Amino acid sequence: MFAVSLLSSCALPRLGAGAPSADVFEAVIDELHSEGFEEITEIIRDGDTLCSVSLSLSGNRLDYRDIPALRAVRNKARILALSGNGCFDGITSLRNVIKDPAGNVVYDVTISDFAAMPEEFEDSAELCSKAVLSGPGETRDALRSAFEEHGILPFEITVSEAAINGYCASVVIEGVPDEISRNVLSAIEDLNRKGGSVSEYRLTVTGAPDGGVICYMSADLIFRDFLWWQLPGTEGASGS
């Protein structure tokens, strides 16, 4: 279904499989901080679970600005797990915790089998080795056409390489979140069935009364992993 780019784990410090777990996890934190996710404060192993802790950027409740850090941690954890790093032997679950400045937990979610190989790929080597079929410019133009076919008129579309596979599309649209999210997913999946390689997308929905953000979604279409924030009190408000 997807054309696959090289894993971005090559950007991580080259620690051997025998390196102490603490050094590997500290290296991951340093890498995330260098990418702008300074709110991430801790990554540790607790038995068969990898745990990350970050501080909320909005104070005392979960906010859409907290979602990108969650996605970044999940991507890095999957990259290292798929790379065969010995520090990840026996780790099957990933727990993401977000705290407010007072230390109160505002988000605490654990996902099982977080790095289970998708059915489309036989092994991690296959996931890492294929080349992307088309460039970001062509992908952006194809996305815009696919959105128009589904009645979507985005304000903005940007395309960059995804962390693990293919491309990541960032889309900004005004409207009703539930309706838009369904149409965006349908348009991207239709494009991929025709040979596209969008494996991750970030959807920002703006709306009345001030044009601010009322919904944010981060979707990984390889691992079928969706992170969703919606402004309380708006139509269909929910979160995951």
Image: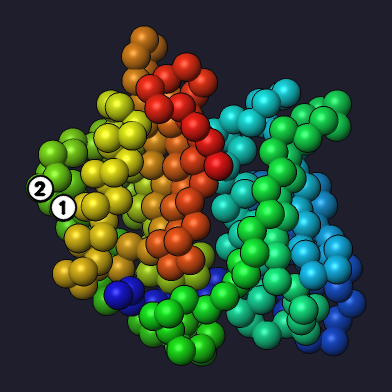
Question: Do labels 2 and 1 touch, CB within 8 Å?
Answer: yes
Q: Residue 168's quadrant in the figure?
A: bottom left
**Does residue 50 appear to the left or right of 81 in the view shown?**
right
Image coordinates of residue 21 in percent, x first then y, are: 86, 73
Identity of the residue drawn at 48% across and 66% down: 223
Classify residue 138 as left or right of residue 7.
left
Towards the viewer: 174 or 160: 174
Would you place residue 67 above or below residue 91 in this image?
above
Q: Which residue is mark 2?
A: 149
Does residue 74 show up?
A: yes
- Where is mark 1, residue-wise? 146
Task: Identify the image quadrant of residue 82.
Answer: bottom right
Q: Report the front residue among 122 and 155.
A: 122
Tell me the element at label 1.
Answer: helix
Give the CA separation, mark 2 to mark 1: 5 Å
Left or right? Give the position of 234 relative to 16. left
